[in-house]
Image (cartoon, grey):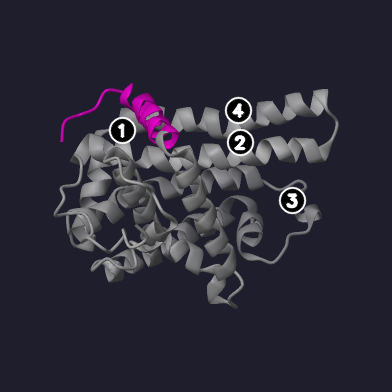
Amino acid sequence: MEKLPAKTGWLWVKEGLALFRKQPAEVSTLFLSYMFLMLALGIVPVIGQLLPLILVPVFAMSFMQACLHIEEGKRVYPNLLLVGFRSPALRSLLTLGVLYLLAASAAVGLSALVDGGVFWKAMTGPGLDPKDIEGSSIRLAMATAAIAYIPAAMAFWFAAPLIVWQKMPLGKALFYSFFAVRRAGKAFAVYGLVWLVIGVVLPAAVSTIVALLINNITVIVFILLPLSIILTVVMYCSFYPTYTAIFGRPQRDEAPAPGSDDGAR
């Protein structure tokens, strides 16, 4: 694995946009199907609140496989959501999802040292009294949780595709992912900064401008909702080039067997 220049982070975003532009409707449909499924799982008592996070690695492979299909000129269908469940590595992916949950819980729990648990209550409770937020250090707590989660995020970033496409055991995948991200640190710093601008600053600026020009909440939502969906889908598409830039394109024998994700054709 060679060190990547910082500008590679910007190229990943551009490549993600290029993948999206080839099949925008298909990838957006895949994403909306995923969101609908997550909402449906949320209805399940108790475990429904945990399943969306535990299943992140499983569904991450759906979007990685979708990008591979786009690159190969194949059509993307919603049944790709099942590709992770059909993988022989499903157990490892679910175990990885449990580690996601534990790492996120630990990071948010650590933030309680900063704001006395306000952010923890906001993330885990049914609701938070606005009075509890007033005067609290919840923003600093959010920043603390984000920083604490960075090492885990580095280990998780490539773990799922390494497990599925390169058939690595869980521990080895986490190890390789962590040091791959560390080695490409400058590129990932630029990548994260670009998405901070595009995914946070841009929507905020657009909403402010629209609010000043048209003081109508319905119009604002009508503009921001599609923009938010498109940006999120493009971001999902940009995950794929981060993998291929470091580990190369998955070989045919690394991809799921025929019929595992092409059944709708």
Residue 18 included in the magenta stretch of the image: yes
For label 3, count other residues whose C-alpha is less than 10 Å away and answer few (under 14), some (14-19) or many (20+). some
For label 1, count other residues whose C-alpha is less than 10 Å away and answer few (under 14), some (14-19) or many (20+). some
Which residue position holds label 3?
A: 133
First of labels 4, 1 by sequence position = 1
Q: Is residue 178 above or below residue 12?
A: below
* Residue 125 position within the rendered picture, expressed as x and y whole percent measured from the top left: 66, 66
Proximity of marks 3 and 1: CB atoms separated by less than 8 Å: no
First of labels 3, 1 by sequence position = 3
Which residue position holds label 2?
A: 227
* Residue 261 position within the rendered picture, expressed as x and y whole percent measured from the top left: 31, 60
Which residue position holds label 4?
A: 202
- Given the image, on which type of amino acid does mark 1 rest? Gly
For label 2, count other residues whose C-alpha is less than 10 Å away and answer few (under 14), some (14-19) or many (20+). some
Q: What residue span does the magenta drawing correspond to?
A: 1-21
Q: Is residue 201 left or right of residue 250?
A: right
* Residue 257 position within the rendered picture, expressed as x and y whole percent measured from the top left: 20, 61
First of labels 3, 4 by sequence position = 3
Q: Nearer the viewer, mark 3 or mark 4?
A: 4
Q: CA distance from mark 2 to mark 1?
A: 29 Å
